[in-house]
Image (cartoon, rainbow, N blue to C red):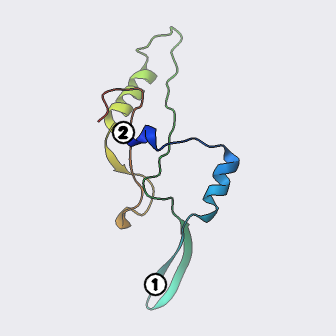
C-alpha cells in the first residue's frame, strides 16, 4: 500500500462530498462520421489518483466454517487482484479507468 495513503486520505460525509464534486471536469466527446457530428456526449472525470474504497466480505456457511466456498472464492479474488493494475470501465484507449486494489487488512502489500 502506498505510504502516502494514510497521510493524504480523509473520509467526508455525503453533503461535503457532493459540494466537492460540483466542479469535476466535464469533457465533451463527439463521434465524427464523414465530417458530421454523429453523437455528442459529455463525460465527467474524477481527478487522477483519486482513491475509492470498498469492503469485501464472505458469508460463513451454516457450520461457521472459515473454509466455506464463499470464503475460498473471496480469497481467490483478493489474491488475484491484489497489487495488480487493471482497467475498469470505459475509455481504456485514452488511458482512463486504470485501478489497483490494495488489501489494507494484509501487511504484505507493497
Quarter of the image where the N terminus is located: top left
At x 46%, y 84%, the residue is 32
The single residue placed furthest to the right in the displayed view is 15
Specify which label sits upstream in the sequence, 1 or 2.
2
> Where does residue 17 sit, x and y in percent of width and height?
63, 50
Image position, residue 58 (x, y; %):
49, 24
Between the residue at mark 1 and the residue at mark 2, the CA separation in whole angstroms equals: 44 Å
Please tell me whether residue 38 is drawn above or below residue 25 in the rendered image: below
Name the spot of residue 9 as percent of width and height, x first.
Answer: 49, 42
Query: Which SS class for mark 2?
Result: loop
From this viewpoint, which residue is outermost toward the bottom? 35
Residue 38 location (% of width, % of height): 52, 83
Horizontal side of residue 65 vs 23, given as left or right? left
Circle 1 SS class: strand
Mark 2, other Cα within 10 Å: few <14 / some 14–19 / many ≥20: few
- Residue displayed at 32% across by 33% down: 109
- Which residue, given by chain and number where applicable, does mark 2 sit on? 3
Quadrant in the rendering for residue 43 = bottom right
CB under 8 Å between discs 1 and 2? no
Q: In which quarter of the image is residue 21?
A: bottom right
Q: Nearer the viewer, mark 1 or mark 2?
A: 2
- Residue closer to the observer: 108 or 29: 108
For image coordinates 38% across by 33% down, the residue present is 77
Give the vertical position of 38 relative to 103 (above or below): below
Report the residue at 35% width, 66% height from top. 93
Question: In this view, which residue lies farthest toward the top?
Answer: 63
User: In this rendering, would 59 be left or right of 108?
Assistant: right
Q: In which quarter of the image is the C terminus?
A: top left
The correct choice, above or below, for 4 with respect to 36 in the image is: above
**Which residue is label 1 attached to?**
32
Amino acid at each position: 500500500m502506498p505510504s502516502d495513503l494514510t497521510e493524504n486520505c480523509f473520509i467526508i460525509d455525503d453533503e461535503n462530498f457532493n459540494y466537492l464534486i460540483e466542479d469535476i471536469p466535464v469533457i465533451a466527446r463527439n463521434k465524427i462520421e464523414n465530417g458530421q457530428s454523429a453523437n455528442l456526449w459529455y463525460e465527467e472525470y474524477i481527478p487522477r489518483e483519486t482513491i475509492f474504497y470498498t469492503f469485501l466480505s464472505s458469508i460463513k456457511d451454516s457450520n461457521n466454517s472459515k473454509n466455506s466456498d464463499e470464503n475460498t472464492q473471496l480469497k481467490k479474488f483478493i489474491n488475484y487482484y491484489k497489487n495488480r493494475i487493471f482497467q475498469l470501465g470505459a475509455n481504456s484507449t485514452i488511458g482512463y479507468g486504470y485501478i489497483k486494489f490494495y488489501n489494507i487488512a494484509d501487511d504484505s502489500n507493497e
